Image (spheres, rainbow, N blue to C red):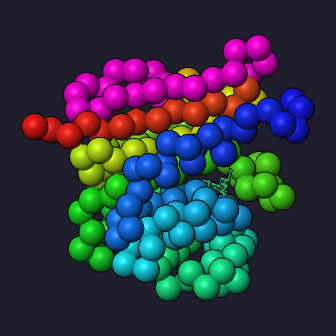
């Protein structure tokens, strides 16, 4: 792809920015090198909070460093654990709602390509995210079907999202003229009136 083509990881922020307000509580389920965690921390302001998870120590320390360099570490709670257990940490902090969840599947850029998110676990994570999502909240998921586990994972999550009922609305953005391109799955929770 040419360097000026639209990137899914950037597109995510077109949709997240209008949704996240100062003071919101949000989650980055795959902190990685911390780029999304940093943007979330900037978006929620001083009164907001970000919960960020990654199973890899390197990812947690990279994210911590980036937040520290930007003076935003105080509004982020970082956990080196499986994101499918996020509810344990939210309960401990008496948090019952999330305005947005950012999920960027696959492997840590610059890290081992063997350590990827897994289909069954990602499905478990998504189910739990629905329980915590606020009205008018948004979950964004970057899918990478270019490797075998990612292909299975993308298919499972798209099938699952396609079956969701009100108040959830599922969207899928995908480049049409590339082979197995990364794509963006988004789940909105509509206001229940
Ligand atoms: C594509 S990277 C995330 C990139 C990140 N959003 C950023 O801005 O740099 C995917 C991350 O998911 C993490 N991961 C894989 N399985 C996980 C799990 N079960 N729980 C939490 N994190 C996981 C990997 O360690 C990796 O760092």
The spot of residue 69 in percent (x, y) is 70, 83
* Residue at (74% x, 22% y) in the render: 180
Instruction: Look at the picture and state if 66 lies above or below 156.
Output: below
The spot of residue 126 in percent (x, y) is 41, 43
Count of numbered labels shown in the rendering? 0
Instruction: Look at the picture and state if 161 lies above or below 140.
Output: above
* Residue at (69% x, 32% y) in the render: 182
Observer able to see residue 68:
yes
- Which quarter holds ligand 1? bottom right
Q: Quadrant of residue 66?
A: bottom right
Near-viewer residue (102 or 120): 102
Instruction: Look at the picture and state if 19 lies above or below 158.
Output: below
**Which residues lie in the magenta part?**
156-180
User: In the picture provided, is 81 more to the left or to the right than 34?
Assistant: left
Quadrant of the drawing holding the N terminus: top right
* Residue at (56% x, 43% y) in the render: 14
Near-viewer residue (137 or 164): 137
User: In the picture provided, is 173 more to the left or to the right than 66?
Assistant: left
The spot of residue 77 in percent (x, y) is 47, 77
């Amino acid at each position: 792809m040419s360097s000026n083509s639209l990137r899914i990881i950037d597109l995510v922020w077109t949709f997240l920015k209008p949704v996240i307000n100062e003071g919101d509580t949000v989650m980055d389920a795959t902190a990685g090198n911390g780029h999304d965690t940093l943007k979330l921390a900037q978006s929620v302001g001083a009164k907001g909070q970000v919960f960020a998870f990654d199973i890899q120590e390197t990812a947690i320390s990279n994210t911590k460093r980036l937040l520290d360099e930007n003076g935003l570490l105080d509004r982020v709670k970082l956990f080196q654990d499986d994101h499918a257990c996020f509810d344990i940490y939210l309960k401990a902090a008496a948090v019952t709602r999330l305005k947005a969840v950012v999920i960027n599947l696959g492997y840590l850029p610059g890290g081992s390509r063997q350590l990827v998110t897994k289909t069954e676990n990602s499905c478990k994570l998504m189910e739990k995210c629905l329980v915590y999502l606020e009205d008018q909240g948004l979950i964004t998921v970057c899918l990478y079907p270019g490797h075998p586990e990612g292909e299975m994972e993308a298919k499972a999550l798209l099938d699952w999202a396609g079956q969701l009922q009100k108040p959830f609305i599922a969207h899928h953005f995908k480049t049409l003229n590339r082979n197995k391109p990364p794509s963006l799955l988004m789940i909105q929770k509509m206001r229940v009136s």
